[in-house]
Amino acid sequence: METQNLSVAGKQALNLIEFDAAEKIVCEIRKHPFGLLLVWLTGLVIATALMLAAVLFVVLVNDESVTNGANASSIAGIVAVIGFFLVLLVLLATTITAYLYRKNVVLVTSEKIAEVLYPTLFNRSITQFAIEDIQNVTIKQNGFFPHIFNYGTLLVETAGESENLTFTFTPMPHSFAKQIVAAREQYINTHN
């Protein structure tokens, strides 16, 4: 199987899933960078808010008119240290979330679709099903940003009791939907 066009996350996902030697990779779907921007902005806003709250508290505690001055400097020091560690914790959580976001991938081959998701650092979800089981491919682009930056949610519905595939922040969702439908049609034409 030709893998040089896959990203690092795609190659790692390929090692987690059974693929036949005759299968060909149709496409690799990775999440849109706009979602990563949202992860970082959210983390930075929370870290900034925590830092400002800690600084404001330290300033208020050190203000002679608010407190009698007793133990004010020790309380301010404790709050500053706690605030610093909370900001570090938020930045670490944001970094881990961004790392996991980038590892999520969907691989479409000539015979199956495989989705590898990392909801947390120590949890991995792998869903795969035969391409012939696809019943419907739907894309959703709700809102201003999905239309401007051309991303959306890709929903691949399957026959029977199989779990449907839902992949958010899919870049160029129309293009990937067409590729999945074309791969299914080609599979049906060659196997019927």
Image: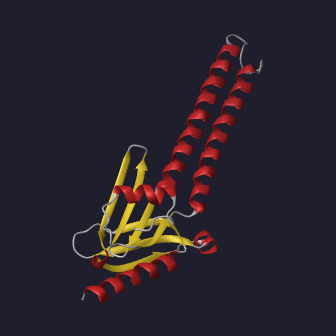
Quadrant into which the N terminus falls? bottom left
Q: Residue at x 37, y 51 (%)?
A: 124
Q: Residue at x 55, y 74 (%)?
A: 172
Residue farthest along the right direction in this orientation: 64
Q: Position of residue 10 (x, y in %)?
A: 46, 60
> Vertically, is 51 above or below 2?
above
Quadrant into which the C terminus falls? bottom left
Left/right of residue 179 with respect to residue 160 in the rendered view: right
Q: Position of residue 67 (x, y in %)?
A: 71, 17
Q: Which quarter of the figure has residue 79?
A: top right
Q: Work out whether residue 172 or residue 107 is closer to the camera in this orientation and state it.
A: 107
Q: Position of residue 148 (x, y in %)?
A: 64, 73
Q: Residue at x 33, y 59 (%)?
A: 17
Q: Residue at x 56, y 59 (%)?
A: 35
Display colour scheme: secondary structure
> Vertically, is 125 above or below 115?
above
> Vertically, is 190 above or below 39?
below
> Vertically, is 18 above or below 121?
below
Q: Work out whether residue 79 or residue 44 is closer to the camera in this orientation and state it.
A: 44
Q: Position of residue 14 (x, y in %)?
A: 39, 60
Number of marks in the image?
Answer: 0
Residue farthest along the left direction in this orientation: 160
